[in-house]
Amino acid sequence: MNRRSFLGTSVAMLAAPAAVGRAHAAEGGRPLPLPQVIDLDGSDASELVAGRASHDFLSGASTQVLGFDGGYMGPILRAKRGQTARPKVRNTLSFPISSHWHGLHVPGSVDGGPQLFIPPGETWAPELEIDQPAATYWYHSHIHRQTGPQVYYGLAGMMLIDDPDAPGAGLPSSYGTDDFPLAVQDRGFDQNGALNYSSSGPDGMTGFRTDQIVVNGAIRPLAEVPKGMVRLRILNASNARIYDFKFEDGRTFHQVASDAGLLPAPAPRQTLQLAPGERAEVVVDFSDAKPVRLLSAPDTNSPMGGIMSFMMGGSGNQPAAVNRRDEFEVMSFEVSATKTGAVQSLPATLAGAPRLLTGEPVRKRRLDLSVHGGMMGGMMGGGGGGGMTISGQSMDLNVINQEAQIGQTELWEITSASMAHPFHIHGTSFQVVNVGGKAVDPATFGLKDVVLVREPTQVLIQFNKKADKRTPYMYHCHILEHEDAGMMGQFTVA
């Protein structure tokens, strides 16, 4: 079967039909699941097997999902800087998938974009030369026009890079004790416990959002933490929802890392916004031993400030509010009566933060994220490969939209004509330098690979890995329904 036949394969029947029955309770409070950790050392244990599975999100129901290694989503992959990681991805499904290493600085030939699909029954075994700062990354399927449903049903997982040569940063680092991965998603269910998904109409326009919050595969879970400093590695793995995290008691926490590595110093926060695809590491002080809930403000990102989604009956459902500000619960924390964390105070500076980019850009590019044909064009194009564009061009696997040179520094300006779009660039990290005409302090942003574009946003970028016309890099909106509908482009690095 050729590429076009593979990429046209539908995954609309991902979940098996269930017998009609009563609605099942979406109860929170289960213990926070901790994914298995696999070291990418080239052993047989490094194989990821993509397949169907069942998962108990709801009380009294088993939900059909996709995932790796027999579960919903996949294990945490861990690798070291200076190492050659050798993951194997085996596809036991009846349709093509891929595995994009989101945030990794690897050549286009192993990046895992839509050109590198894995046919049913086949195994892909790339070699990934790891040479970048320690940080929290992730991996997910990236099939053109099918990324939204494949990720929604579970073909994703987190990835951690460690740097053995970097000096210790003095941060909590004991996995599952004072260092927790948190993959945050919103998921919706029908009365039979099956996952709901839509990319048409207003769902294609705003991106698919729904009303149950899931962390590591559990609805609004409870994490037991030690008394003292605790590190939370937060990934927004939702298709479209933007989160504005805060603690219910208003406590201050400290952000210590962004998408691509540590910040130069801990940055105090009371709120933290993460768009789809973004990651942040924060350290929270639980020395007062008080239980607390992690909340988020509602997501109103859509054309006309959310009015369109309400009027058209889209999925823009908000989770149940817990206060008058319509904030909702993400998860909760309880402090152990017997465990004390290894770290009781934060250092003033963080050793091992990546170097910021310097030098004048040799080239400037301007990319406009827009809806071709206006609002109705976007609604009609949702999920079908049309309607959404970048600089007037809809994604075409046969078209190279940009060409870059290795080692050169460029300035990209990204604009949005309608709503906010999280913009992602493959194969590298970038430095946000200007938002809405105002200079950005790099110490507060760090290096990124996703930036939420509301106002004109300028990023300084340098490519140090190659990507040819056969396996180019992608740049795209990380609202997955927008990406599937055409808001994506391809570029080479020579």
Image: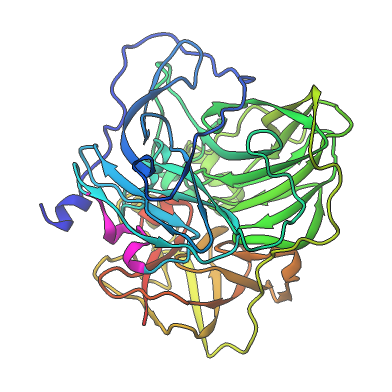
Where is residue 450 drawn, in percent x and y? 55, 61
Residue at 35% from the left image edge and 57% from the top image edge:
112
Quadrant housing the C terminus: bottom left
Question: In the picture provided, is 229 more to the left or to the right than 164?
Answer: right
Q: In which quarter of the image is residue 4?
A: bottom left
Where is residue 259 drawn, in percent x and y? 60, 58
Q: How many marks?
A: 0
Q: Is residue 376 visible to the viewer in this orientation of the structure? A: no
Q: What stretch is highlighted in magenta?
A: 108-118
By what rule are the colours in the image chosen? rainbow
Q: In which quarter of the image is residue 454?
A: bottom right
> Taking 104 as reference, is 92 above or below it?
above
Residue 401 highlighted magenta (yes or no):
no
Residue 110 highlighted magenta (yes or no):
yes
- Viewer-nearest residue: 3 or 366: 3
Residue at 38% from the left image edge and 76% from the top image edge:
466
Question: In the picture provided, is 457 more to the left or to the right than 169?
Answer: left
Where is residue 303 drawn, in percent x and y? 55, 53
- Viewer-nearest residue: 204 or 218: 218
Q: Quadrant of residue 426?
A: bottom left
> Taking 141 as reference, is 367 above or below it?
below
Residue at 53% from the left image edge and 90% from the top image edge:
362
Question: In the picture provided, is 362 more to the left or to the right than 19?
Answer: right
Q: Return the residue found at the far left.
A: 1
Residue at 34% from the left image edge and 42% from the top image edge:
44
Where is residue 395 drawn, in percent x and y? 33, 64
> Taking 57 as reference, is 229 above or below it?
below
Q: Is residue 18 visible to the viewer in this orientation of the structure? A: yes
